Amino acid sequence: MPQIIPTAEPFFFPGKGANPKTGCLVTHGFTGAPKEMRWLGEYLNRQGYTVCGIRLNGHATKPEDMIRSRWQDWLLSVEDGYNLLRSCTDQVFLLGLSMGGVLSLTFASRFQAGSENAGRRVRGVVAMSTPYALPDDPRLRYTKLVSWFIPYMPKGKGAPGEGWFDQEAWKQHVAYPKNPVRAVAELNELLGVMRESLPQIKVPALLIHSRNDDYVIRDSMEKIHAALGSTDKHMLWVEGGGHVITEEPTRERVFKAAADFIKRVASA
């Protein structure tokens, strides 16, 4: 009996035409699933790129699985996908949404020129809707303890799908309906690792964020941009969509910006 939620499976699209040796690793967000990156993956594949959409450990099955996951497991899922792509491409770009962006940036700092993995370096990063930190809350320091008594917490105060601009897109979206509290503690630790890693990242980076995103702290993109060690780094604001900009009405502009970035950097 399958364990993965139907339509939320990982995916792999072989490249074609002039760009099959350029790989794109697309990574979904916290409590999300590969499905939220599938439209982006299909778009990039139409440009000829080889695309791998991974499923992070503990995701797209049942929330109890995520409670057992640690941030190192999520980063290892990214490394698995990266090595799969490296086996059939010459260069790999990382594209991540929300926590997927956090993981992509963190991973890039470890697989780039000048590191022990320089021979398998990341070529560039696109981080979308990526948080710099969680909202300041004194309860965060006790999250691991609290998780023993309160395993889950609501995702927000509003009704499900309230922050979405495209309700049809929300209806097909796959994600856990609640946040595992233990996983929130892991996300908080991962964000600390990312912040420490940002100055070490030297590869080109594109940051994309929606002005209508009420899920992530508003100045996250600017803080990430300021801390990045790369000299080739750019920010792009989009409007008319919420946090999941890969499925909202913002997606076409996001997809084109990502493809243009990859084309420019890959040919440099």
Image (cartoon, rainbow, N blue to C red):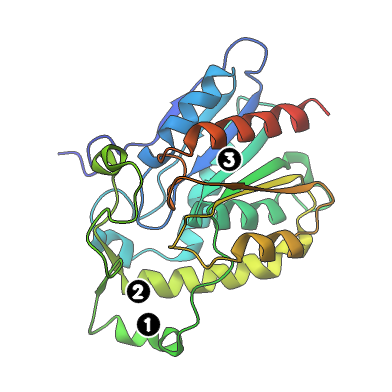
Label 1 environment density (alpha carbons within 10 Å; few <14, some 14–19, many ≥20): some
Q: In screen coordinates, is 142 left or right of 206? A: left
- The spot of residue 48 in percent (x, y) is 59, 17
Q: Which label is found at residue 182?
A: 2
Label 3 is placed on what type of residue?
A: Tyr
Q: Which quadrant holds residue 1?
A: top left
Residue ID for mark 3: 82
Q: Which quadrant holds residue 201?
A: bottom right
The residue at the point 44 percent across, 62 percent down is 214
Picture layout, residue 147 above or below residue 210:
below
- Residue most toward the top? 17
Residue ID for mark 1: 144
Element on which disc 1 rests: helix
Residue 112 appears anywhere in the view: no
- The spot of residue 13 in percent (x, y) is 47, 23
Marked residue nearer the N-terminal end (1 or 3): 3
Q: Which quadrant holds residue 181?
A: bottom left
Q: Are marks 2 and 1 in contact (CB under 8 Å)?
A: yes
Residue 18 appears anywhere in the view: yes
Label 1 is placed on what type of residue?
A: Lys
The residue at the point 65 percent across, 37 percent down is 93
Q: Are marks 2 and 3 in contact (CB under 8 Å)?
A: no
- Residue most toward the front? 240
- The spot of residue 148 in percent (x, y) is 26, 83
Q: Report, in whole angstroms, how far the alpha carbon at label 1 lies from the one at label 3.
A: 30 Å
- Residue most toward the left? 1
Label 2 is placed on what type of residue?
A: Arg
Q: Report, in whole angstroms, how far the alpha carbon at label 2 lies from the one at label 3.
A: 27 Å
Q: Which label is found at residue 54?
A: none
Q: Report, in whole angstroms, how far the alpha carbon at label 2 lies from the one at label 1.
A: 6 Å
Marked residue nearer the N-terminal end (2 or 1): 1
